[in-house]
Amino acid sequence: MHTLSSSLDNTSLVLLLLECCQQLEEGHRTWATYKKESAWGLKRLELPLEEKSQRSQEKMEEVEGNINVLREEQRSTLERVEVEY
C-alpha cells in the first residue's frame, strides 16, 4: 500500500510539474508577443520623430546657408561703399 501511495504522489508531482511548465511556456509566449508589439509601437513612434528631426536639420542648414550668403553680400556692399567714398 505504501508503494501505491508513493506512486500517486509521484504522479501528482509530475502532473503539477507539467502544468507549471505549460504555464511558464504560455507566459513566455505572451511576453514575447508583448515585447514584439512594444518594439513595433516604439518604431512607429520613432519614425515620424526622426523624419521631423531630419527636416528641422535640413531647414537649419538652409537658413545658415542663406545667412552666409547675406553676410557675404553685406561684406561686398560695404567694400564697394568704402572704395567709392
Image: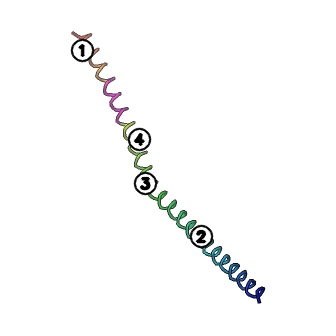
Residue at the spot 31% in from the left edge and 27% down from the top edge: 70
Q: Earlier in the sequence, mark 1 or mark 2?
A: 2
How many marks the image carries: the answer is 4
Picture disc at residue 2: none
Residues drawn in magenta: 63-71
Q: Amino acid at mark 3?
A: Pro
Identify the residue position indicated by label 4 in the image.
58
Q: Give the number of the mark in front: 1 or 2.
A: 2
Q: Amino acid at mark 1?
A: Val
Q: Secondary structure at mark 1?
A: helix
- Kindly report the distance in space between the C-alpha atoms of the residues bearing marks 1 and 4: 35 Å
Drawn side of residue 29 relative to residue 65, left or right? right
Neighbours of disc 1 within 10 Å: few (<14), some (14-19), many (20+): few
Depth check: give the residue in front, 44 or 79: 44
Q: Secondary structure at mark 4?
A: helix
| Residue that extends furthest to the bottom in the rendered view of this protein | 1
Q: Amino acid at mark 2?
A: Arg
Query: Which scheme is used to colour this image of the protein?
Result: rainbow
Q: Secondary structure at mark 2?
A: helix
Q: Amino acid at mark 4?
A: Glu
Identify the residue position indicated by label 2 in the image.
29
- Kindly report the distance in space between the C-alpha atoms of the residues bearing marks 2 and 4: 43 Å
Picture quarter with the N terminus: bottom right
